[in-house]
Each structure stands twice: as C-alpha cells, then as structure tokens.
Image: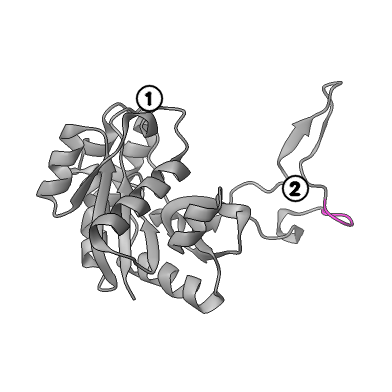
Amino acid sequence: MRNFCFIFARGGSKGLPRKNIKLLNGKPLLQYSIDTALACSSIEQVFVSTDDPDIARVAKNSGACVIKRPSELATDSSPEWLSWRHGIEWAREHFGNFDHFVSLPATSPLRSVEDVESAIKQRLQQQADICISVTPSNRSPFFNMVKKDAQGYLSLVNPPEGEVSRRQDAPDVFDITTVVYVAKPDFVISNYGIFSGKVTSIEVPKVRAIDIDDIYDFKLAEAILSEC
C-alpha cells in the first residue's frame, strides 16, 4: 500500500511564536515528526505543507518534500481539514494516488514509530474511515466535569446512569491527541470533520501524547527528553 505522511506547519503561532522550528533539545520541533515519518518502513513519502520559508528550509534539510500552502489556508481561523484536502490533492497531482493519508502534527514530538505503524494497521483492520490517537483523560464528564445553566447552577456534563460515587465507577473516557491521524484520502476529500465517518483509535501513553501549544508544554517536553 502507498502511505503518504503529511505535516502541516504554518508560520503563525500565537501560543508559542515560531514554535514549529523552535529548538527542542537542539533540534527544530518540526524535525522530530519528519524523523519519525522517515523511520516508518510503511511510509513512502513525507510532505511538509507550509506557508513559511524558514519552515520550508528546515523541512527540506530534514528530508521532507515541501508543499507550498496557500496563504488563505494558513491563518489562525483556517480549518486544518481544508489544508488536509489541499495536501492530498497536491500529492495526487505530483505523485499519483495513494492509500493512506497520515498526518503527524509537529506539536507531538514524543510519538514513536510504533504509534504511527499501529494507527495504519488499526484503520485497515477495523475498515474505518479514520484512525485517531487517544490517551486516558484526567477528567471525566461522568464524574468531575461540570457545566453551568442559565441560573449559574452546576451539573455534570454527562450524568451517568445510576449512582457514581467514585471516578473508577464511571465509564472510561479519553482525550484526543495530536500524535497521529490516519485516513482514507477520499474520506477527507468527500467529508468534513473526523466524526463524519467511522472512527477507530489507538491508545498512547501520556508521556508520548504531549501536544505543544505553549511554553509550559515545551518545557515539559524538554524535561521528558532530557530523562530519556
């Protein structure tokens, strides 16, 4: 099967400016995702979609093929799904059809090759439209996540059936991570949004599920890498 990896890395970042090429333990953040993709035996091509020349330079130096992202797809309000579509269409035009669209966001530098390969296998085995990565959630909508009503009173986001007195009694819930997304290309082209089709998942431990959004996430990733 032809599996193509895409990393979408725009130049603008409000939470942590220039984070996609900020040095993490001496290596640009973006390079971690590229290196993992290149180490996956099942991935044939690695692309970085970006509007930024500095990011493009790092991508090329790291061994990826650069897709120039249109400026209208690189704003704070641009839906990532539309960038996914653009990447798929560009790759098909230049490299032909392929079987799996694999997205490895630059903000998850601690993923493993096994995570990526497992997601590809899981999508195939479950015959799902897309496989996402999840990690056990610290909070549960059945137990300790609440919402306010119009009068300001609180209630559980998702009240469980029956009496729940301990977190352990509530159903297991998970956080979606940015470790890996694997989808059928035609699903992305023909639909809009992850949950518009059949969704399966792989579970990753919290240590590999970090998603760098601000300097605190970045420092945590540094600390974890320093211990490895």
Mark 1–mark 2 distance (CA, rounded to whole Å): 33 Å
Residue 172 part of the magenta segment: no
Q: 6 or 17: nearer the eye?
A: 6
Question: Considering only vertical position in the picture, is 150 above or below 105?
Answer: above
Residue at left offset 38%, top offset 29%: 72
Report which quarter residue 223 is drawn in: top left
Q: Is residue 89 visible?
A: yes
Q: Quadrant of the C terminus?
A: bottom left
- Residue, far front: 93
Q: Give the x, y percent position of residue 4.
A: 31, 62
On residue 143, which mark appears? Answer: 2
**Point 75% across, 49% down: residue:** 142
The residue at which mark 1 appears reads as 14
| Colour pattern | one colour
Read off the magenta span.
160-164
Disc tally is: 2
* Front-most of residues 190 and 136: 190
Residue sitting nearer the eye, 86 or 205:
86
Q: Position of residue 39 (x, y in %)?
A: 22, 66
Mark 1: few, some, or many residues within 10 Å (few <14, many ≥20)?
Answer: few
**Amino acid type assigned to the residue bearing label 1 in the image:** Lys
